[in-house]
Image (cartoon, rainbow, N blue to C red):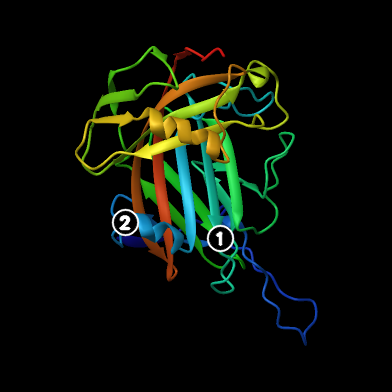
Amino acid sequence: MKEFYRSSLFLAGLTLMFYSCDSDNDNTAIPTLEEVEYIVVDANTTDVPVKPGKYDEVDGIFRYTENHFFTSGTPSRFTIDKGYFMASYSGKDTNGPHVPLQSSNINGQAMCTEVYINNICDTSRPSTSWNLYGKQHEVRNLKWEYLNSDKSKGYRVEMTDVPEAAKWHVVPTRISFDEDIRFEFERNSVKDSIIVGLLIVPKEGIGKVLPSPSINRTRQIGYLVKPGETSFTVTKERLASLSQSALGMPTAADSVFLNLRTTRYVIKVIDNREILISYIVDEFKPVTVDWKID
């Protein structure tokens, strides 16, 4: 359900009016962020059934990831300690003048346009690409706000029924890429999707101060678990196929982590556009790898 409210800040009832100095020019001043009317979007429900094939058909994709593996701010470092998040939005610039977005923020923190480089966050330009790395709030509710391109209308997307992380049941402590890897876990909700996988990080980047929240050649491999199932086996044949893929087979120069990912997907129709919203919770576990020695 959507409800409208005025998010205006007035001092002592004073209303600010703007007029053009040119009487022949009827330009109207662009409203400030505080004067925009927001539409509240309830992201606890989906407007459109979520199917894997829909991901390529939507107009925009928003992701919020708890327990992200890079810290925020200055300096940025790799970590698997819980408490950090990453949020991103990517959208098509082909659906009318209301795209791209303006003034996008997460739980009150400004997102950055384009790419986050050298800890500089640009929030000044409209864009179809936004991101933010931050420290996870104690309250796990999601509030994503943004304005349309001319700042005439704003949207506040709220999710309070956020997913709880699936729980590891059996966690391997040692793995070999010549053997199957078996994941066993406990689900918390039938509404959530589960992905099991590997996080592969070059050892040379771990522990270093980073100019941006990334380490070159870091990659994630994921396998979607069927609904209702509580175990998944990554076969040695699947692992062997990594050497033929763009991801490449991990080597002794990499650190490897297992990941149990819980995701809540909804699609909201906002201003006649379908936006896929994903709330993700990662659970990383380090493992020792028995590397094959030729």
The amino acid pointed to by label 2 is Val
| Residue at point 50%, 30% (across, down) | 68
Q: Can residue 67 be seen in this view?
A: no
Using the image, tell me which numbered label, if any, was put on residue 35: 1
Residue 185 percent across, percent down from the top left? 26, 25
* Vertical arrangement, residue 142 with respect to residue 127, above or below: above
Q: In this view, does 22 lie to the left or right of 186?
A: right
Secondary element at tag 2 = loop
Crowdedness of circle 1 by 10 Å Cα count: few (<14), some, many (20+)?
some
| Residue at point 75%, 76% (across, down) | 20
Q: Can residue 275 be seen in this view?
A: yes
Q: Residue furthest right?
A: 22
Name the one closer to the observer, 232 or 169. 232
| Residue at point 41%, 34% (across, down) | 238
Residue 276 percent across, percent down from the top left? 41, 55
* Vertical arrangement, residue 104 with respect to residue 190, above or below: below
**Quick check: marks 2 and 1 in contact, CB under 8 Å?**
no
The amino acid pointed to by label 1 is Glu
Disc on the earlier residue, 2 or 1: 1
Residue 166 percent across, percent down from the top left? 29, 29
Name the one closer to the observer, 232 or 84. 232
Residue 89 percent across, percent down from the top left? 53, 51
Q: Which residue lies furthest to the bottom in this view?
A: 24
| Residue at point 28%, 60% (across, down) | 49
The answer for how far apart the CA atoms under marks 2 and 1 are is: 34 Å
Secondary element at tag 1 = helix
Mark 2 or 1, closer to the camera: 2
Name the one closer to the observer, 154 or 292. 292
Residue 169 figure quarter: top left
Using the image, tell me which numbered label, if any, was put on residue 50: 2
